[in-house]
Amino acid sequence: MYILTFLFGLFHQTLAFNNFSEDALAAHFSEVLSPGSQVWLPSSANYTSAITQRWTIYPPAEPTYILALKPALPSDIQIIIEFASNHNIPFMATGGGHGYSTTLHSCKNGIDIDLGYFHDIKIDKEASTITIGGSVKFGELIQPLFDVGKEIRLAECVGVVGATLGAGLGPYTGLHGLVIDALLEVKYVTGTGELITASQTENAELFWGARGAGHQFGVVYEATYRINDATNNGELIVATMRFHSSDNASLWEIMKDIGSNQPREMSLAFQVNWNDEFGGLNIIINAKWIGPMEEALIAFSSFLSLNPIEKIITQIPWTSIYGSSVPGSGSFSCDRGAVSSNWAVNLYTISIPAFTQTLQKLARFYSDFPSSRTSVWSIEKFANSVTLSTPDDETAYPWRNTTIYTFFALQINDDSQDDAINAFGASFQAEMAASSGYDDLRVYINYGRDEGEEVWYSAKKLPRLKALKRKYDPMELFSHYNPVRISEHSLSATRKSFPLTLQKIPSLFIHPPFTITTLRDIPKNVQPSLFRARFCPWILPALVRYVIAPQLLTVPLSSRNEQLLDLLFFHVLNPAMATDELIDHVQRKLEETDAKLTTKCFTSIEPYITWEEESYKGRIPVPLADLELELNEIPEKYQKTTMYSSKLSTNDWR
């Protein structure tokens, strides 16, 4: 039962940050961060203008913060991460603020590390490279690159680094490939607190993981990319075409005919939405051709032959690409504060019946939920020949052969309709996945929701990613965004390894040497404290199911286990109420899971008994360096004793 002593401390520590008021935290960071840094409370004036706000504010997909920090230096990021982890305060880094996933909600009452001061843009024209800070957005690169005759893959108005770490898509994907294929170097503050540079020649395995799962290992505060010479003198053709919904089958046929033969210069973005001015349900195509007008007109001729109800075809400089987007798309993509619940699917092939049925269901959706008619069905199609030219094993991104990325951005403007609207989204995802051309559901990580690590990263890539996670983020600090798990249950809410304390109960003076390894050994008016205990994540699966309270988990437990945990924590947080019957019950549960604990599971441990009396205060060390416990292997004669000696080695048991 030694493990219970350890984990009860863990349970109590999950609440430890409540001992810090927001003002106290703000005062602390104001003192320890470099002079150029800033500290903001949510209640501060100008908070929303000083701190990067999130694109969506859909509550089930939102982190919550008690403090926002704008570090000026990489060392400031280290200080923040060290303090937050040591005091069990969750945190996340914000670059562009565009990331979406319902897993983000696991960051509650945390610290927002706003990278707004990491905003440099440095272009080396001769080397054809650009180095940027972690908060730079794609839109901020357009003019500087255009001015030197260069271009880079583009997304919408999102953070460059954040989008890159998941792969990076945009209108120039067909021409140049994924954004990760232009990435040359990243600079991290990792989950272990180290400043690390990763590239093809330095920390190459981390660089592999950064390209497709880069959010999992730390904060990227700087990145360097290869840039390309401007295509067609930096000009492109944009065609915006609007169709009645009755044209949908013909449009799907054209898209299917284009298939894998899509020209590299062409990008297609479909939006199915509601517009009262044009009779309700509409289909808009925003097509781009990175080349001359005469080629574009030939490429778009199949769509134009359907006689769109509205069309605008124009040649523009690269600098105007966002202003030329689909009417309304800029607002949808860039404005902050949307209550958007997103459901996405990767497709290898297009099923015309599935697309047609989805449009019919969307028509009913708009009828049933008129307050959600701002919802959009988005379909993106890029040529992927250049993307496929990079070998699959070159990067962590697993879905290079995807030909269509599609998702619903469901706007929930009436809380009472949340469940029904998400049921529609789940149905869309399941039905579209069934006709995707793949054997299972696959989702581009930057469009992910809660589907799971194999859906985002693939079973093939996960072993290498988990190995990287154990090396660079063994405590799973960076597990709030579409996480790679290295334990059965991620305790992202509990942080899993920081100073552990229990409230001391005074009045009994204890004379050294006093040792303790089981809950039974704790005197009724003394509780242990464990300090700086760091343990391996892999021990958790066998133990957490019965020992950690269900509200601390990111996954639900069965009702049977919840009843056990309710009973356990009602009694055991006060050892005086911990009966032998209850202890034996929990011990049996642990043994049923073949639970094992050894000192090898601790990277460092300094446990001791603390006590307090009016005339004396102190603490007694409990050395465990030469003690190894395996719960199922303790000999019978020692299982019944009231105390195990801390100097007893496993050799004495055999």
Image: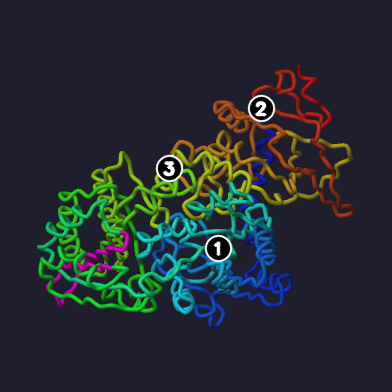
Residue 599 drawn at (x, y percent)? 73, 34
556 relative position to 487: left or right: left
- Which residue is pictured at 26% across the width and 65% down the height? 376
Mark 3 lies on residue:
458
Mark 1 lies on residue:
109
Q: Is residue 129 placed above or below 487 in the rendered structure?
A: below
- Nearer to us in this view, 263 or 122: 263
Q: Secondary structure at mark 1?
A: loop
Q: Splitting the image into 4 quarters, where does residue 323 fall?
A: bottom left
* Quadrant including the C terminus: top right
Q: Earlier in the sequence, mark 2 or mark 3?
A: 3
Reply yes or no: does residue 518 show up in magenta.
Answer: no
Mark 2 lies on residue:
631
- The type of colouring in the image is rainbow
183 relative position to 263: left or right: right
- Nearer to us in this view, 612 or 478: 478
Magenta segment main secondary structure: strand
355 relative position to 602: left or right: left
Extreme residue toward the top, this view: 654
